[in-house]
Image (cartoon, grey):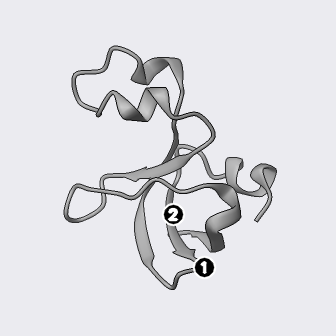
Amino acid sequence: MRVDEIERFLSVFVEVELKTGKKMAGLLMKSGEEGLKDSLVYDPELYRKKGYYFLDQWPDGTSDMFRASHVKKIRKS
């Protein structure tokens, strides 16, 4: 999926299906954003790795990082 297609969902609660078949739901966020730099909540790796996306607030509190090219489907939930 193209980056512009993914980024229109930033800060929106979405359901994502990756090309591996894994399905996730949560608030779509982008790694490398300045707000993640000194955050006490997020892993510092989320700031250092640029060009990835992740979901916040999904049921078990974790989320895989993925690139736009890994996404098969995305929809607002």
Type of amino acid at the residue the image marks with label 1: Lys
Q: x, y percentage for residue 51? A: 63, 40
Reply above or below: 23 against 14.
below
- Of circles 1 and 2, which is in front? 1
Mark 2 lies on residue? 14
Location of residue 66 in the rendering, given as x and y in whole percent from the top left corner:
53, 57
Q: Residue at x 44, y 78 (%)?
A: 23
Q: Quadrant of residue 70?
A: bottom right
**Res 19 label:** 1
Label 1 Cα neighbours within 10 Å, binned few <14 / some 14-19 / many ≥20: few
In the rendered image, residue 31, in percent from the top left (x then y), is placed at 51, 36
> Earlier along the polypeptide chain: callout 1 or callout 2?
2
Quadrant of res 50? top right
Observer-nearest residue: 64 or 61?
64
Quarter of the image where the N terminus is located: bottom right
Q: Count all numbered tags in the image, as a single digit.
A: 2
Q: Nearer the viewer, residue 5 or 38?
A: 38
Say whether residue 58 is left or right of residue 8. left
The secondary structure type at the circle numbered 1 is loop
In percent of the image, x 54 and y 48: which residue is there?
53
Instruction: Check contact, mark 1 vs mark 2: CB within 8 A.
Output: no
Identify the residue at the far bottom of this view: 21
Above/below status of 62 relative to 31: below
When the figure is inspected, residue 11 is found, relative to residue 71, above or below; the finding is: above
The percent position of residue 4, horizontal first and vertical second, equals 80, 49
